[in-house]
Image (cartoon, rainbow, N blue to C red):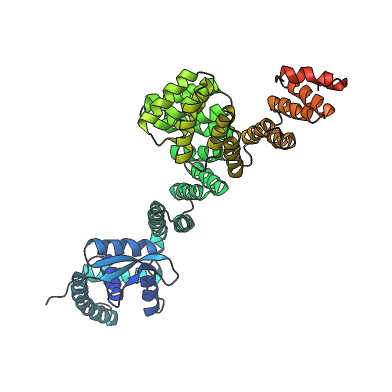
Amino acid sequence: MTPTKSDRPQDTLELLILNVVALGPVHGYAIARRLDQASRGVVQVPEGWLYPTLRRLENRGLLAADWKATETGREAKFYRLTRKGRAQLETGAMGWRRLAGGVSLILKMSEGGAKCGPGILRSLVFLLWLVMGADVQAQSSRTSSSISYLERGNEWMAKGELDRAIADYDLAIALDSRSAAAYYNRGLARRRKGDLAGALGDFDRAIELNPHEANARLSRGLVSYAMGRVDAAIGDFTAVCEFDPRNASAWNNRGKARGDHGDLAGAIADFDQAIKLDSRNAVVWGNRCGVHYLRGAIESALADCDKALKLDARNADAWNGRGLARRRKGDLGGALTDFDRAVALAPQQAGFYNNRGEAWLLRGESERALADLNRAIALNQRLGEAWNNRGRVWFFKADFARAIADFDEALKLNPRLADTYCKRGAAWLALDKLAEAESDFTRCRALGGTQKPDAEKLLPEMEGGRRPR
């Protein structure tokens, strides 16, 4: 049989890998380690060559692979030799032995001896590369390795294995510190884990490396918004709208941020644009419904929420928005039905319990209101509206001391709630605390609130000692 001549350096590496895998199933890192150990440090294969070669052998049917746990507990791809691969190994080994014999003869030749063919020279060049490290290939190898880790990180993230994804993105960045994609993807994984500060840092770096990357700016805007940095979020969403004016998500998210900032007209304009670009996006219709409600345009709010629910009946925000609009119209039964659906779809959303609790209070069902408001506060102790509404329930039940305590909490969170000062003043008045009541009523008026006429009339009578019996 005529020996197969290796015309490509990669053929030699493939043969070495097949020889290691023939000993039993093994993962990529272990293959590189065994080559290094068996050659006493002479054959050190960079990952930028190893993993592409493994994929090539697998695609050609010479290797098969399965995901299994390693000795450290992490999953890895274990390779095993197929029947076709074993046949290739036997053929290649025979050719290599003859080639090695020829190389040995060449090394013993004196100057002026016989010339060697191009295939043998290429193999010799490859051997020199293995020994000397191929400095000329170093940067491309590192980049290739970085891409391999990036791709594997993406696979882990798709499976929801965020810690493993982040570990691979770390390696990709270590190999190529200018990989904007690695920083961006690590930022996505960190955001999903709730590490907003870490995600923000990664998106900053991705944008520094690629200033016109719309996805990184959009993601940074979302993180800034979640952290309460509304101005920064609006800045990033605006940049995306300029880079990519057909990005409906950017218009929608800027609309949300503008609404939170009190720019309701600007929010409506952004939602209008988002709907023009993506008229079947239920989230945008639901968001515009909420802003119409805040502007007092109740019929427009109802129409938008109805549209959102036709597009997606599992849109909890749309059920909640329609419930608010119905409550404003006085349809408490319809509002409670909508709030029930919102709570069923998003049972961890404190605001939905607060809104339903207020509807129960308006119907005079204080115990049901109290249960919902207790739940809202347990889920989010910084929800001032829930403290305020629970204070109203305690007032309704004539438990004025508890009412005052809850109004205190609401005012700690937002000291400009004019009507809450009025309510607390009325509670102080009910407890004959006249100085405290007068102070709260004064603060209420200064902030533009309106105290109840009966309380305002009763205060001077009590101060004069003429309290009705």
Seen in the picture, residue 179 relative to 270 is either above or below; the reply is: below
Q: Position of residue 196 (x, y in %)?
A: 55, 46
Q: Position of residue 315 (x, y in %)?
A: 42, 35
Q: Position of residue 392 (x, y in %)?
A: 66, 31
Camera-nearest residue between 135 and 272: 272
**447 left or right of 357 in image:** right
Name, please, the residue furthest toward the front.
469
Q: Position of residue 363 (x, y in %)?
A: 56, 28
Camera-nearest residue between 206 and 375: 375
Seen in the picture, residue 371 relative to 63 is either above or below; the reply is: above
**Residue 402 occupies which quadrant of the picture?**
top right
Camera-nearest residue between 338 and 86: 338
Name, please, the residue furthest toward the left.
1
Seen in the picture, residue 70 relative to 337 is either above or below; the reply is: below
- What residue appears at the point 54 percent right and 27 percent down from the top-left corner? 258
**170 left or right of 48 in image:** right
**Residue 450 occupies which quadrant of the picture?**
top right
Residue 238 in view here: no
- What residue appears at the point 58 percent right and 44 percent down from the top-left corner? 379
